């Protein structure tokens, strides 16, 4: 039986009542080319991220998903528009913003505890507090027994947990995550998604999460923002009104979940 719109929790996002953690206004990003006009990557993107909100961004390859993360953290200068974090224009990396890449980039000469401690050092955690904070994160990330292990001794999923621990040790109020689980196998990706949600539900930091995986986006996020092909514009912005806690394997057969993922696929097929 076909579902009507009233039967499913898919709806455009309502405006946030509180000031946003991130405000992006009519953002344009271009990249110079030596023998051609500048390449326009983002075309007039406007987007708010509320305090404590988990926003996933999906879109075709090369559409500028990673680019918008770099603009938020001040690594790219806009050709037009502006980015504000906590009410301040971004012109350099804000100290309250942390970035997690797809590749874990752990320091091979540091143990698990020492790699996590890097985040605490960079975040200005007092030296007297760093050991306790690292111990808390090792327990939070279920890495007990591996504090003295070297990165080469860890599985891919465990390495990503250490990378996440380093980000949390930095203590950012805004977490930017660029396909952090994209290189993992399906089972490990599901496990890492559960870990991330468990931590996010406990601490409620704002997250902007870039992924190619629509099911992952719907399973994790409060909202899914859909980019068109380059030059990117927003072609969909959906509230994910599915109950938490969520389990991707259990959700995959639910009509509301299927409808939303299919709606996003339809958005991706729209002509530019």
Image: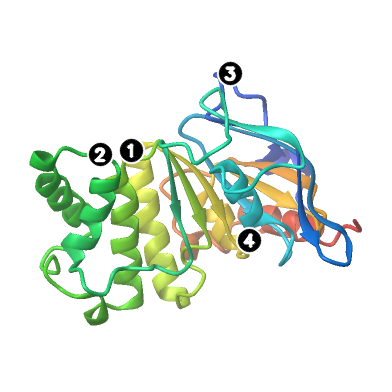
- The residue tagged 4 is 214
In terms of sequence position, does the residue under pointer 2 or pointer 3 come before the other?
3
Q: Which of marks 4 and 2 is nearer the N terminus?
A: 2
Residue at 71 percent across and 38 percent down: it is: 11
What separation in Å lies between label 1 and label 2 (alpha carbons)?
19 Å
- Residue at mark 3: 17
User: Separation of disc 4 and disc 1 at Cα?
Assistant: 24 Å
Residue 70 lies, with reference to residue 85, above or below; the image says below
Query: In the visual, does 262 lie left or right of 35?
Result: left
Q: State the residue at coordinates (24%, 62%).
A: 115
In this picture, residue 269 sits left or right of residue 87: right
Quadrant position of residue 241? top right
Residue nearest the observer in this picture, 181 or 68: 68
Q: Label 2: which residue?
A: 124
**Whether residue 134 is situated above or below residue 214 in the rendered picture:** above
Q: How far apart are marks 2 and 3 (CA)?
A: 32 Å
> Which mark is in front, 4 or 1?
1
Locate the N terminus by quadrant: bottom right
């Amino acid at each position: 039986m076909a579902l009507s719109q009233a039967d499913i929790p898919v709806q455009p996002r309502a405006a946030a009542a509180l000031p946003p953690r991130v405000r992006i206004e009519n953002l344009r990003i271009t990249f110079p080319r030596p023998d051609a006009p500048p390449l326009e990557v983002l075309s007039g993107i406007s987007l708010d991220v509320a305090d404590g909100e988990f926003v996933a961004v999906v879109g075709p390859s090369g559409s500028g998903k990673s680019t918008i993360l770099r603009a938020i953290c001040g690594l790219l200068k806009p050709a037009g528009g502006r980015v504000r974090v906590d009410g301040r224009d971004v012109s350099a990396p804000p100290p309250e913003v942390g970035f997690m890449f797809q590749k874990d980039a752990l320091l091979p000469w540091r143990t698990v505890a020492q790699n996590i401690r890097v985040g605490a050092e960079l975040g200005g955690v007092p030296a007297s507090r760093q050991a306790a904070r690292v111990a808390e994160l090792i327990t939070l990330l279920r890495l007990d027994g591996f504090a003295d292990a070297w990165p080469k001794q860890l599985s891919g999923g465990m390495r990503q947990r250490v990378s996440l621990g380093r980000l949390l040790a930095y203590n950012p109020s805004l977490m930017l995550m660029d396909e952090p689980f994209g290189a993992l196998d399906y089972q490990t990706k599901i496990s890492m998604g559960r870990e991330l949600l468990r931590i996010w539900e406990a601490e409620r930091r704002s997250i902007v999460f870039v992924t190619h995986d629509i099911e992952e986006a719907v399973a994790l996020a409060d909202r899914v923002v859909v980019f068109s092909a380059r030059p990117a514009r927003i072609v969909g912005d959906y509230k994910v009104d599915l109950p938490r806690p969520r389990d991707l394997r259990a959700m995959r057969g639910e009509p509301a979940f299927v409808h939303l993922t299919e709606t996003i696929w339809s958005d991706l097929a729209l002509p530019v």
